[in-house]
């Protein structure tokens, strides 16, 4: 007798509905891909304290999809970009978001969750991905309730301890922790003053929350490598050793531990399994980069995976996801390790921090590091096609354009996550160019200067091919070379098909 296949079918299964998984789900939904999220938690509620905000490039990405206002309304814009606590002003960067947004991860996840729901992506909650097998043509994903899902691709957005990464046998090389911190919220019998102390181990802080008996503590521990689950006794002991009292701390709402363990997946893809967000990279939270990195992984991967799933592009397009995003995270990991070293307190580190503070007060170093911390300086290595104009591989600016339908911002053209071939060389100049169905051709005028963050002013291009993730894939003249190749490479144009006007 034939076994009955009861597995539910989807094009993509996302393991983990944190910020990365939800952003990826939104990107796939915009591209019309049948996607399901499997999430362990019953709700969006975030236990403990995690990300406290978003930097400029993540805000730009959300702006491209038309949802940034939801986040801006819920948070507060501030100049809080920094390097190891040394402030980096980004207010002169040419972006509509020259600031960071202070907004807790709980709120960020709530807003992302509402958007994903509007887009109609189902989330299977209170279930875990427990195992999977890759078969030719698909992946069978097993869940903790015994159900099976069959998909073309599985994406592990399941955080730093990723089961997907481990089960796929993808190595996670890097550095063991050298710093370990406890973070907790609890009640106290003795109300402390807000206090920050710098010890040999690092920063120690305690502060009341509101006017009540509750406090939040962040304590750098004396030793690294303790058991994963911290206890109230760990917090009591650490408080007593620093302030000489544990303030009668009791009734914790949550206690967690974070370290500077720094690791990166050696491959972001293994066959039909991909990794994104913390599943692909972990680092110390200094600088507040983690959540934004994951959201931007998702935006880089989403359109590529959609094109592969719908057979618009070959599977090899997915290799550009690893090439582009692994390099970006490697750079962030290096910067967070440098910042972690700078947070240690002794006379030599104080001297080094003083030197760094002087350097970062100078304009060019300030712009360079602000570009890195804000994510505005990313330049993907697009290989042979990225020679020439400095815009290629970099983010397309949110230009104030004028089209036949009236004024329009560049980012508004990216709302649906579709590529744009922007013709700035006069109406109709690109009408004869070959173009895959999904690529929007937009004739527009732009009369301002072209300023790129960190780079400065660049020459105005006549035409730009913009990928759905907002990065320029090609620039040139309407009849210039390379456009057909760029369209074929990124958007699956069949270059063997006859080209209008060329007689082929
Ligand atoms: C103390 C602290 C402060 C931080 N501050 C900042 C900051 O200011 N700015 C910033 O950008 N980042 C910050 N971060 C980092 C940020 O929290 C993470 O980078 C971000 O949450 C990563 O998102 P993610 O979706 O990739 O992973 P996660 O948020 O870890 O989400 C993974 C999801 O997968 C689910 N899951 C796990 N296993 C399974 C499974 N087998 N099946 C189904 N579901 C599963 C989990 O329940 C979870 O919802 C901070 C982190 C910490 C610890």
Image: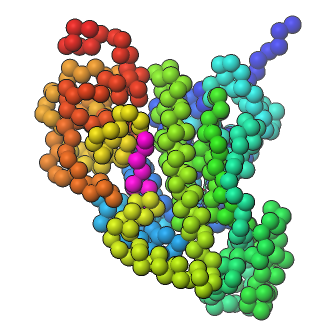
Q: Residue at x 27, y 36 (%)?
A: 475
Which SS does the magenta portion mostly show? Answer: loop
Q: Residue at x 65, y 45 (%)?
A: 265
**Quadrant (top left/top right/bottom left/bottom right) for the N terminus:** top right
Q: Does residue 502 lie above or below 387 as drawn?
A: above
* Nearer to us in this view, 333 or 253: 333
Q: Residue at x 49, y 70 (%)?
A: 83
Residue 82 percent across, percent down from the top left: 47, 70
* Nearer to us in this view, 371 or 147: 371
Q: Image check: 135 left or right of 230? A: left
Q: Does residue 258 lie above or below 436 as drawn?
A: below
Evaluate whether residue 239 shows in this view: yes
Image colouring: rainbow
Q: Image check: 166 left or right of 477? A: right
Residue 335 percent across, percent down from the top left: 53, 62
Which residue is the extreme one toward the front?
A: 348
Residue 380 painted magenta: yes
Q: Quadrant of residue 142?
A: top right
Evaluate whether residue 127 shows in this view: no
Q: Does residue 212 lie above or below 163 as drawn?
A: below
Residue 346 percent across, percent down from the top left: 63, 84
Residue 186 percent across, percent down from the top left: 73, 77
Residue 1 painted magenta: no
**Ligand 1 position by quadrant:** bottom right
**Quadrant (top left/top right/bottom left/bottom right) for the C terminus:** top left
Q: Which residues are magenta?
A: 374-381
Q: Residue at x 73, y 23 (%)?
A: 7
């Amino acid at each position: 007798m034939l076994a009955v296949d009861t597995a539910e079918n989807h094009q993509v299964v996302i393991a983990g509905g944190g910020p990365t998984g939800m952003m990826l789900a939104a990107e796939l939904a915009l591209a019309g891909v049948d996607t399901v999220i499997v999430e362990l938690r019953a709700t969006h509620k975030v236990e403990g304290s995690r990300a406290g905000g978003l930097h400029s490039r993540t805000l730009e990405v959300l702006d491209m999809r038309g949802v940034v206002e939801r986040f801006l309304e819920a948070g507060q814009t501030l100049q809080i970009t920094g390097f190891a606590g040394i402030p980096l002003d980004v207010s002169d960067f040419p972006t509509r978001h020259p600031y960071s947004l202070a907004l807790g991860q709980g709120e960020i996840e709530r807003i992302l969750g509402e958007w994903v729901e509007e887009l109609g992506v189902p989330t299977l909650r209170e279930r875990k991905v427990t195992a999977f097998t890759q078969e030719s043509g698909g992946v069978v994903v097993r869940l903790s309730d015994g159900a099976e899902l069959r998909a073309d691709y599985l994406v592990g957005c399941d955080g730093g301890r990723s089961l997907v990464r481990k089960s796929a046998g993808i190595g996670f090389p890097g550095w063991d922790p050298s710093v370990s911190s406890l973070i907790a919220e609890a009640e106290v019998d003795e109300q402390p003053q807000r206090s920050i102390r710098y010890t040999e181990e690092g920063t120690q802080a305690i502060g009341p929350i509101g006017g009540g008996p509750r406090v939040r503590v962040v304590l750098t521990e004396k030793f690294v490598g303790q058991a994963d689950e911290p206890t109230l006794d760990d917090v009591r002991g650490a408080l007593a050793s620093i302030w000489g009292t544990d303030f009668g701390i009791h009734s914790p709402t949550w206690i967690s531990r974070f370290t500077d363990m720094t690791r990166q997946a050696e491959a972001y893809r293994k066959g039909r399994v991909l990794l994104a967000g913390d599943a692909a990279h972990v680092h110390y939270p200094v600088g507040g980069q983690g959540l934004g990195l994951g959201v931007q992984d998702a935006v880089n991967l989403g359109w590529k995976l959609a094109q592969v799933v719908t057979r618009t592009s070959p599977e090899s397009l997915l290799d550009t996801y690893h090439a582009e995003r692994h390099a970006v995270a490697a750079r962030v990991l290096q910067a967070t390790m440098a910042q972690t070293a700078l947070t240690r307190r002794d006379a030599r580190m104080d001297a080094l921090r003083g030197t760094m503070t002087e350097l970062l007060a100078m304009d060019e170093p300030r712009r360079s590091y602000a570009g890195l911390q804000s994510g505005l300086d990313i330049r993907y290595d697009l290989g042979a096609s990225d020679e020439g104009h400095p815009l290629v591989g970099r983010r397309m600016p949110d230009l104030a354009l004028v089209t036949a339908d009236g004024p329009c911002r560049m980012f508004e053209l990216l709302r649906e996550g579709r590529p744009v071939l922007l013709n700035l060389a006069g109406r109709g100049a690109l009408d004869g160019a070959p173009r895959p169905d999904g690529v929007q051709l937009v004739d527009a005028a732009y009369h301002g200067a072209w300023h790129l963050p960190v780079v400065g002013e660049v020459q105005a291009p006549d035409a730009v091919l913009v990928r759905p993730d907002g990065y320029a894939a090609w620039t040139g003249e309407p009849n210039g070379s390379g456009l057909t190749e760029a369209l074929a490479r990124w958007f699956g144009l069949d270059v063997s098909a006859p080209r209008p006007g060329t007689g082929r």
